[in-house]
Image (cartoon, rainbow, N blue to C red):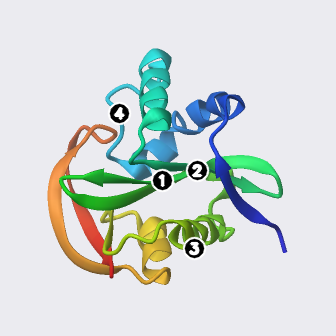
């Protein structure tokens, strides 16, 4: 079985992550993305801020030693939330589910919250498999789709 592991994000990961976060299908599924996924300067500034923040747990996800994405937890409006981004070439292989299980071992805060576009069945499945329960929905503007869409809100107690 292939090994999924978490480690700190390294400078060498940034080029691959930038490319992953520009993939049109990935951006569409994530929906709530930056205004311009092609803006490398904004990406670099954002990543520098995330990597320096003491209240953010940001990890690289590796599959058999190869970088395939990131997963992190952060505090927003007093709630600890998580997010992840997995290279589309690695979708459907259980990598996100395993990475999430590993992060849940590292981040002990509960409740933990997550959000996904309501039509992103893959991400919703990953979250439910990890024990997250749907607690509501919201409507927000999704830069990647240029429209307001429904977002599912989940919580792990």
Do labels 2 and 3 touch, CB within 8 Å? no
The quadrant holding residue 79 is bottom left
Where does label 4 land, which residue?
Answer: 34
Front tag of 3 and 4? 3
**Badge 1 element:** strand
**Badge 2 element:** strand
Where does label 1 land, which residue?
Answer: 72
Location of the C terminus (image quadrant):
bottom left
Compared with 40, 65 (above or below) is: below
Where does label 3 land, which residue?
Answer: 101
**Distance CA(mark 3)–CA(mark 4):** 27 Å
**Distance CA(mark 3)–CA(mark 1):** 12 Å
Residue at 55% from the left image edge and 66% from the top image edge: 106
Which mark is drawn over residue 20?
A: none
Do labels 1 and 4 touch, CB within 8 Å? no
The quadrant holding residue 4 is bottom right
**Reading the chain from its start, which is encountered first: label 2 or label 3?**
2
Compared with 102, 88 (above or below) is: above
**Reading the chain from its start, which is encountered first: label 3 or label 4?**
4
**Distance CA(mark 2)–CA(mark 3):** 13 Å
Could you tell me residue 113's position as x and y percent?
Answer: 31, 67
């Amino acid at each position: 079985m292939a090994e999924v592991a978490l480690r700190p994000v390294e400078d060498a990961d940034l080029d691959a992550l930038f490319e992953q976060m520009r993939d049109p299908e990935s951006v569409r599924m994530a929906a709530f993305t930056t205004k311009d996924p092609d803006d490398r300067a904004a990406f670099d500034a954002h990543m520098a801020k995330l990597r320096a923040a003491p209240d953010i747990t940001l990890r690289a996800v590796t599959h058999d030693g190869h970088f395939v994405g990131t997963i992190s937890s952060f505090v927003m409006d007093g709630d600890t939330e998580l997010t992840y981004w997995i290279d589309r070439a690695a979708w459907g292989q259980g990598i996100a589910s395993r990475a999430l299980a590993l992060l849940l071992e590292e981040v002990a805060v509960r409740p933990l919250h997550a959000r996904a576009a309501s039509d992103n069945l893959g991400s919703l499945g990953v979250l439910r498999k990890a024990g997250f329960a749907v607690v509501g929905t919201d409507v927000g503007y999704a830069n990647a789709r240029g429209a307001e869409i429904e977002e599912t809100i989940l919580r792990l107690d």
